[in-house]
Structure formats: C-alpha cells, structure tokens
Image (spheres, rainbow, N blue to C red):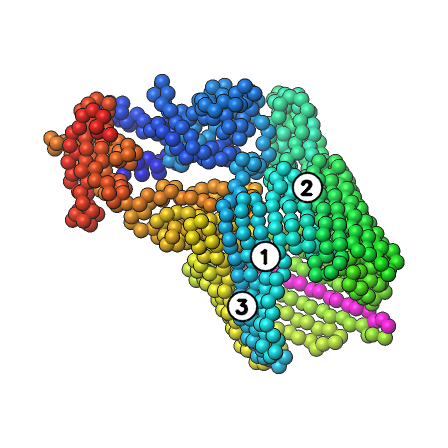
Amino acid sequence: MLSALMANSAVVLAEQSIEFDEDMLVGKSIPRGGLARFAKTDRAAPGVYEVDVFIERRFVQRAAVVFQLMPDDEIAPCLSADLLHAAGVQLSAAAMPSAACRPLADWAPGATAKFDSARLRLDLAVPQALLARQHTGAVSLAELDAGVPVLFANYDASAWWAQSAQNNAPSLFATVQTGANAGLWQLRQQSSFNAAGNSGGVRWHADRTWLQRPLPAWRSQLLVGDAPTPGHLFGSVMVRGVQMVTDDRMLPDGLRGYAPVVRGVATSNARVSIRQGDVLLYQTTVSPGAFVIDDLYPAGINGDLGVEVAEADGQVQRFTMPYVALPQSLRPGQQRVAWAAGRVADVPNTALAQLDWQAGINNMLTANAGVRGASGYAAGAGGVVLATALGAFGFDVLLARSRGHSASWQWAGRWSQRLAGADTNVGLEWLQRSPGCLDLTASIRTYADRCTGATRQLGVTGNQPLGRWGQLYVSALLRRGDEAPTQDYQLSYSVAVSGLSLTAMLSRQRRSAQSGMRGTQGNTALLSVSGNWGEQRTVGASLTRQSGSDMSTISQLQTTLSGTLGTRASYGIAATQARQGNTALDVSLQQNLAAVTLGASAALGKSHRQAGLSARGAVVAHAGGVTTGPWLSDTFGLVEAPGAAGADVRDGSGATIDGAGYALITALQPYRYNDVTLGTQALDAATELLSSQQRVAPYAGAVPRLRFKTRRGRAVLLRLARDDGQPLPFGADVYGPDAQLLGLVGQQSQLYARVAEDVTELSVQWGDQPGARCRVQLPAASSEASRAGMPSATLCRMATGAAAR
C-alpha cells in the first residue's frame, strides 16, 4: 500500500524531494496541497518516535525523541540537553541543567537535523567548533548496558568409543560452565565430569569459581576467587584471591593496540592524510595551529608512515614517522596495571602477591616492571620496548630466588623490522637463562627437572609477501644448554590461484646426542590443495611424508570433502590412504538446532574403529522463564519478542524465538555497539514486528535484554466508500481506537491495516473541516472476503466534531 511504497522509496530517495502532480489524480482526493507532506522522506506526523540518533554519521544512541510541528508547517525534533551532551555537543554550563527540550538550532546555532522516517534515523549536523572530540568506536558510560539478572549454564558433553590395539574403552566427558548476574556483579563456575571404561573410574571436579565485576572508572576488571594472573612478565599461575586487571576492551577502537602519536602544525584549515605505502590509514581536517592525532588505528604491519598536511592555499608539507612495534608496545600515555593477592590455587599455605605495570612513555619507549612474592619465593622483572628507525627492540630481565635454590636470572631480547622496498618482515628472539628455579610453580612444588639447567636459545622468523605469487615463511629455533641441543627448522609457501589454495611445507627437527643418549632427527613434508566445489562444498587433498632416524618412512594421501546442508547442518568426510596399506575413512556431522548443537562422528580403518556423539548448548533462567539455546560466550544477549515464535536471530547460531517469545544471542562484543536483527519469514499471519533491528553496547559479562515490539492482531483489507458511494480521498489518515495512526488510504480507496482482535471500529480523517471525517465498522474476521484475502467493501459513515477520533 502507499505507506509501504513510501518506506521503500525513502531509503533510495533520502536526499530527494518528490513532487506529486495532484491534477493527475482521478476522483476526489484530499484538499489541494494535502499530499505535500509525502514529498520529503523526513516528513512524519508529529509525535514521539524511537529513533537511532547519529551525529556526523557516528551512532550516538537510540532515544525517544519528540517531533513537533513548527510554524513553517515542517516537523522538527525537540532535543534535550542530555541527548546532545551524549552526542558530544558542547553546551554552555547554563544550558546543561535544563530538562526542557528545544529545537536543535536553539542549542547549537548553524546545526541541522535530518529525519528518515522510513528507517527511524535522525542525523544531526553540528559545526565542528561546537563538537567535543570523540574517538572512533567510543561508547559513553551512559550507553553501556549492565544487563538483567539471569542464571545460566553452558554444557558440552561427548561420548567416545574407539577400538584399536592400544585402546578399547569407552569414555564420557562433559564440561559445565555456570553463571549468575546481578547488576554488574557476575558469578562464574567451571566444572568437569569424566567417566572412563576399563576401571577408569568416574570423576567430577569443580575446576574454578570466581566473582567478577567491570570497573569502568579504572578501565579495569575486578576478579575475586580463582583466576589466572596475567602472563606478560611472569608465568601465569592460578590464584585464589583478589585481582584487578586493566581491561583494554574498554578503550575505543582508535586507542587499542600500538600506533604513534602524530604531531604537527597547520597554518590554515588543513587536511591531514596519513599513509603507509599506498594505503590511506587516516584523514581528517584540522584548524590552524598545532594539532595532535592520537587515535590512529594500528596498521597491523610495520612500515614508515607518510604524513601529508594540505593547506587551504594549496601548499603541502610532508614528513615521515617510523612505525615499528612489538606485541608489548603501548601508545604514548596508555598504561596497563594488574595486581593480585591471595594464595596459589590447589597449593596449601602458599600466599602470593603480584604487581605488573606497563606504560607507553612516548612514540619510542614503552616500559614495564613487576614484582612477585610468594611463600619461599621472590621475583622481579623489568624491561623496555624501543621503536627506532632500525626496528623495534625489546629487552626483558627476570630475577628470582626461592627457598632451597640459589638465585637465578633470565634475560631476553627481541627485534622486529620490516625491510622497506622488499616488504620483508624479519624477527629475532634470543634468550639466556641461568641454572636455578625461575618458575614459581616449579619452586613451590620442587620439580627438580624444572629448577636446573642453563639455557641459551635463538629464534629467527621471516615472512616475504610475493604479491599474486603468494607468500613465503621461514623459521628456525636453536636451543643449547645443559640438556641436549635441539634445532627446529620450517619453510612454508602458500598461494591462491583461480579459486584454489596451495600450501607446501618442509620441517626438520634434530636433537643431538648427549650423556650416552643417541641423537634423533625427523623430517616432514606436506603438500596440500583445496578449493570450493559449488557454493556449499569445499574439497581438498594433501600428501604427507614423514621420515626420521627412529621411525620408518611414512607417506599418506588424504582427500577431504566438507560443506553445509542448508543453513544449520555441516559435514566432513576424509579418506586416507597410507603407503603401508593402512586405509581409513572418517565422517563427521553437526546439526545446529534452536536449543542445542548435536554432533556425531565415525571412523573405520584397517586396524581401528571409532564412534562418537556430542551435545553442546546452554540453559538460561530469567524473569520471563527458562530459555535454551546454543553455547554462549561470557557476554551474550536475551531477545524478547512476544508472539514472534519462529523468528530467527540472525547471528549465525541457528537460534529462533521460542513459544514464550524469547531467544538467546550467543555472543555480543563488550563495550561496542552490536546490531541484532530478527528474521520475519517464519512469523505467523497474526504477528507483525514493529522493528526488526536493535542496537546494544553491553558491559563485559553482561546479559542485556533486547525487547522487540510486536503487534498481534488480524490483518484487514478494505475497499472503503462514503455514505454517498464516493471513494475516500487518497492519502487520508486512518486511526485506531486509541488515536494511533495505523496507515493511509491508498489507491482505489483501499486500506490495509493490522488491528487487535477486539477492535471493531476505525476512523478516517483527511482534513480539519467537520465534513472530512468518517467511521468504519470492521467486518468479522470470519467473513468470506477476509478468509479469501480479498478487499472487503465497507462503508465509512460520516462523522462530525472530535468524535471521529
């Protein structure tokens, strides 16, 4: 009908005005000029709308906005100071306490608003001078969703049976992760169950229990209970106690990872462009004077950055900044802090305290330091990362002393560089360790084999892109010390040609003879090719050859076929032929159901057989009942859509709205906006989704509830006529009993609307004069025309005064 046609057209013609030639309309219509409200996509009836608010194409939030009819017969949003403050508009201190809404131009002179009624999107354009600086991907604290109280459990169970010369016992294994949320406090627990045949016994073990809470004011997360310590400076250990760890997920996209701060001076309104090679990484406009760019996205690869400042008068200044980083590098001004206090889990009477600190000092220097103390153990660590024109250098030192052992030390260095011109990425790592006991776990448990032996180690990596000819990778690791020297080498090459992926790899491992033990060596060669066969199948083949001093040469050819069956099932088939005559066939199948993911596997070989079953899913208890679904991440969502049973959640998990009106979103990205969409193909004829997409930004570990409004009722299709038999004016408004606008009268005086089952009367209005209103008595749902889906001829009886609405 007309409303649907307008909605479809609004997306395409968002920037255009449409002129209706009313002389082309046959029959009576609304008064001349009455169709002008349809000439622009930003026209709508005055009222309150739930809209997505954007400023400079950046999403701000979803809000209920009042749209008022202005003196010039246009509608305009009436905006609050709180909404504009959240959007980053700088308001005067006197204006901030005001609770009244005002037109945008009253708050910010020169600002404009554009409303797309079809998409319920409000775009604000505000002069740059009135905008506070916003980092890309930033989400305000007011927009973060702490979620609703829930109890949930993830489960992953598998049954396995294999028959071979070495094994002939069935086994059952399951992991269970449970949780409870109340506000920002989140309780978590992990357990495992294992039952093995042949007297393997049955074992249930509570692996760890902890309480967590995000602390946005400190950009950190609080952990109480069993949790591993960070492994940046010391080896990670499980601690039962209290920890607070910096959470980089709270940073905006433009402040994550490492990138240098770019500083310069502009003499006019200038355009600043930053490139790495031929790739444009960043571009913005700056005002005259000194400028700072500190939200440059990490480039992902090392390589100098070219900065170009184009002035308004045409002059251009250029300079180069070195860009090279190691994983430990931080942006200037960024810090990471982690502290822990408690005892080592599963080790009685072993207290532990630890403090880690990392800081980006400037573009060139990142520093880190830490201390760890435990019963009978003390350690300290420190280091730096230097970004220079010759590459990124990292140096770390670790000193430790434990009861019953002499002091020990370890120093390590790293170097990484991208060779200009050849695009070659090269890395070196070297390590030297004294005899002693550096490792805390080995120290407190007196693992003698881990507390002795000096070690020297050198590692080399290289990566060479070859353009359309593929990529070459090489690595080598040499280790010497009190144990037998070892060498590991690997060379691999990969390329994609005409839809096929080809990989070749050679590796060699060698262990030298020492202390009466003979040396060993092994070699592996692999050649594989894979490609798509149709839209839903992938085929591949690989040839592997293994040889060594302590084994006979083994060669095998494996052919694979994998794909999907519809949208919820996948399969895999592998056939293996070995040189010695051993053959095997492996088959696996996975089915994603709305409430659980099921899997099955089977294998048959010359000397073995295998079969397995698995089930993986989740159960969530909430205020609205109990909902089942696929396996959940730590941050997930609860969808509520009353009466929308069968609608699918389009997140790839296969979840659908159940009979109670709920479904689970398996994973949400914390501290980022997530768009959640429902599919409507499976909805019954009596249900309509008023909106099919919502946006949410949750805290880490939160379970936000997304409520999708639905309208239940019967659909009516009428051909209306007035008392005198004349059709109703084209474009007349149709209202329900609560004065809610339901739609418009379309061509041939037809009306399509969805109304509640108990609604028996509608009103139609096409002007303010007394004779421009009438009432419609709806036919019964069981009428012959309604059952056939044909327009039902219905009279619209004339009414006067306000009674029409």
Q: Find the residue positioned furthest to the right.
A: 406
Q: Is residue 532 above or below residue 108?
A: below
Inspect the magenta stretch and tell me whether residue 514 lies in it. Answer: yes
Q: Mark 3: which amino acid?
A: Ser
Q: Is residue 784 above or below residue 101?
A: below
Quarter-of-image position of residue 507: bottom right
Give the residue displayed 63% in from the left and 50% down from the top: 467
Q: Quadrant of the C terminus?
A: top left
Where residue 651 sits: x, y (%)? 47, 51
Q: Mark 1: which amino acid?
A: Gln
The kind of secondary structure the magenta stretch mainly shows is: strand
Q: Which residue is mark 1?
A: 189
Q: Which residue is mark 2?
A: 258
Q: Is disc 3 surrounded by few (<14), some (14 to 19) or many (20+) residues within 10 Å? A: some
Q: CA distance from mark 1 to mark 3?
A: 20 Å
Part of the protein shown in magenta = 499-515
Q: Is disc 1 surrounded by few (<14), some (14 to 19) or many (20+) residues within 10 Å? A: some
Inspect the magenta stretch and tell me whether residue 553 lies in it. Answer: no
